[in-house]
C-alpha cells in the first residue's frame, strides 16, 4: 500500500511518482488524502478529499488505531522520539466513530459521491492492515538527507 497525504507527488516529485506508478501497476494500492483531486489522486484506489484543515481528526484517529492495535514500533519510539506518552493520551479520544462524527458535522469530505463513514472506515482498515508498510515508510524517512547528515556527524564524533 502506498499512502500520499497532502502530496501531489505526480507534479512535485515526478521521479518518485514514476516509482509509485510502477508499484500501482504491479498491484499496490494507492490511497490519497488531499482536498484537491490532483493528478496523483487520479491514480488512487481511494481518494479522501477532505476540506482544508480537517485532516487532523483523521490523523488523530489513524494514530489512535495504530497504537490501539499494537502496530507501533515501541523500540523505535523509545530510541528516537520524545513525548510519546503525551501523544498517546492526546489521540486516545479519537476513535474512528469520533473522527467520523467530527468530519461529518464539519461536512469535511468533499470528494464527490463519497460516504464519509464508509471511506474513513476503509482507510483505517487499509492502514491497520498495512502496519509493515507504515514501518517501512518511517524507516525510509530516516534516510532523508538531513538524517544522513546527522548520522555522518555522529559517526565523525561531532
Image (spheres, helix red, strand yellow):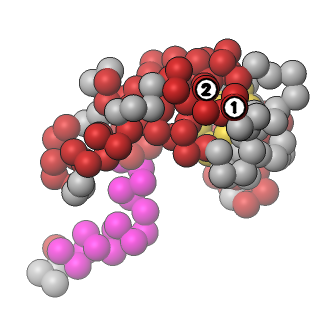
Question: Between residues 31 and 67, which one lies in front from this camera angle?
Answer: 67
- Quadrant hosting residue 56: top right
Q: Is residue 133 magenta?
A: no
Region rendered in magenta: 139-154
Q: Residue furthest right?
A: 112
Q: Which residue is nearer to you in this view: 142 or 49? A: 49
The image shows residue 80, relative to residue 35, as above or below, that is: below
Tell me: 41 left or right of 122: right
Outermost residue to the front = 105
Instruction: Write the residue at 58% across / 18% down.
Output: 121
Pointers 2 and 1 in contact (CB under 8 A)?
yes
Residue 16: give x, y in percent of width and height: 64, 52
Say which residue label 1 marks: 105
Q: Which mark is residue 101?
A: 2
> Which element carries disc 2, helix, strand or loop?
helix
The answer, for residue 147, to whether it is visible in the render is: yes
For the N terminus, which image quadrant? top right
Across and down, in percent, residue 37 comes to 84, 42
Coordinates of residue 140 in the picture (x, y in percent): 41, 50
Quarter of the image for the C terminus: give it. Answer: bottom left
Residue at position x 39%, y 32% from top? 93
Q: Is residue 48 left or right of residue 96?
A: right
What residue sits 70% from the left and 23% below the top?
A: 116
Amino acid at each position: 500500500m502506498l499512502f500520499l497525504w497532502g502530496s501531489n507527488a505526480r507534479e512535485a516529485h515526478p521521479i518518485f511518482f514514476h516509482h509509485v506508478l510502477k508499484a500501482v501497476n504491479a498491484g499496490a494500492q494507492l490511497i490519497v488524502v488531499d482536498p484537491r483531486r490532483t493528478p496523483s489522486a487520479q491514480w488512487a484506489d481511494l481518494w479522501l478529499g477532505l476540506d482544508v484543515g480537517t485532516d487532523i481528526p483523521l490523523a488523530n484517529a489513524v494514530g489512535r488505531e495504530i497504537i490501539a492495535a499494537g502496530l507501533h514500533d515501541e523500540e523505535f519510539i523509545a530510541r528516537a522520539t520524545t513525548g510519546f506518552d503525551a501523544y498517546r493520551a492526546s489521540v486516545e479520544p479519537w476513535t474512528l466513530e469520533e473522527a467520523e462524527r467530527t468530519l461529518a458535522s464539519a461536512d469535511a469530505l468533499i470528494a464527490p459521491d463519497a460516504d464519509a463513514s464508509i471511506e474513513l472506515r476503509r482507510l483505517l482498515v487499509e492502514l491497520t492492515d498495512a502496519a509493515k508498510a507504515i514501518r517501512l515508510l518511517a524507516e525510509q524517512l530516516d534516510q532523508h538527507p538531513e538524517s544522513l547528515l546527522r548520522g555522518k556527524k555522529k559517526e565523525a564524533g561531532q
